[in-house]
Each structure stands twice: as C-alpha cells, then as structure tokens.
C-alpha cells in the first residue's frame, strides 16, 4: 500500500481532491472552484483544489491565446496539444491525490493564493 503524506487526512478527503483534478478535464475551472470554495475545512482537499484551480485558470488562458492565434492559423494546431497536456497532467494529479500525495502542476500560474 502506498504511503500517505501527513497532509492527507482520510480517504474522503483524498477522493474529493482526486475529483477536483478530474473535473478540470470535464468542466474546466468550474469544478475545482466549487470544491475549493466548499472544502475550506479539509486541508488536503482544499490545497489540491487550489492547485487544480490555478492550473485550470492557466489552461483557460491558454485556450484564449489559441483562439486569438487561430486567426493566423497556428491556433488550430495548438488546441489539440493543449487538450492533451491538460488531460495528462490532470490524470497524473488525480492519481497522486488518490494516494494522498501533494501534486504540483508544471507551468501553472499561482493566481489563487
């Protein structure tokens, strides 16, 4: 069995953190935002939801940049790449959260403190 970090306090909290990361794939920043706002009393889930929220805001900024670049033709190439990056990092984060490990997204802006 994988060793849990001290920041995790139970399977319910780990599941909530995992859901925050997975919802980023499906509904963007809205899912992690809801979990972030409703789990302030759960330290691990709150921290992971904040991490997922920051990453999804970064991805949303990336979508906006792709939209602008689509007018010159390059954005259409970047859309699938950004989708794959989001998918891979969210799955990696969800797997880490299910084990109670802290996950830090690469290339994530820390907009929510």
Image (cartoon, rainbow, N blue to C red):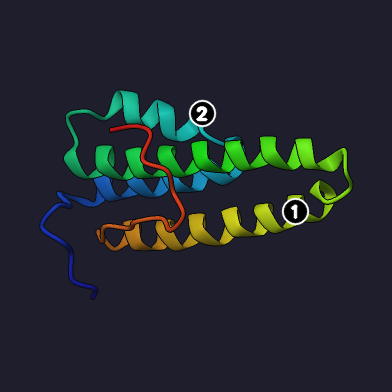
Question: Under tag 1, what secondary structure?
Answer: helix
Give percent across and percent down for residue 71.
87, 38
User: Which quadrant is home to the C terminus?
Assistant: top left
Give percent across and percent down for residue 14.
28, 50
Q: Farthest residue to the left: give it.
A: 6
Left or right: 50, with 65 as reference point? left
Mark pair 1, 2: CA separation:
23 Å
> What residue lies at 70% left-to-right and 58% top-to-bottom?
81
Labelled pair 1, 2 in contact (Cβ < 8 Å): no
Query: What residue sits right under mark 2 in the picture?
Result: 30
Precedes in sequence: disc 1 or disc 2: 2
Toward which corner of the image does residue 62 lie, by quadrant? top right
Question: Under tag 2, what secondary structure?
Answer: helix
User: Which quadrant is home to the N terminus?
Assistant: bottom left
> In the rendered view, would you say 110 is above or below 30?
below
Front label number (1 vs 2): 1
Q: Farthest residue to the bottom: give it.
A: 1
Query: What residue sits right under mark 1 in the picture?
Result: 78
> In the rendered view, would you say 58 is above or below 80?
above
> What residue lies at 17% left-to-right and 39% top-to-bottom?
43
* Frontmost residue, 30 versus 14: 30
Give percent across and percent down for residue 77.
81, 55
Q: Residues within 10 Å of mark 1 (few under 14, many from 20)?
A: some
Q: Which mark is residue 59?
A: none
> What residue lies at 59% left-to-right and 37% top-to-bottom?
61
């Amino acid at each position: 069995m994988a060793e849990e970090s001290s920041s995790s306090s139970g399977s319910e909290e780990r599941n909530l953190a995992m859901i925050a990361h997975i919802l980023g794939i499906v509904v963007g920043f809205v899912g992690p935002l809801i979990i972030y706002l409703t789990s302030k009393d759960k330290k691990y889930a709150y921290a992971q939801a904040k991490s997922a929220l920051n990453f999804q805001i970064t991805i949303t900024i990336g979508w906006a940049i792709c939209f602008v670049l689509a007018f010159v033709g390059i954005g259409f190439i970047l859309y699938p790449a950004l989708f794959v990056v989001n998918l891979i990092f969210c799955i990696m984060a969800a797997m880490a959260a299910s084990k109670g490990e802290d996950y830090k997204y690469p290339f994530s802006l820390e907009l929510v403190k």
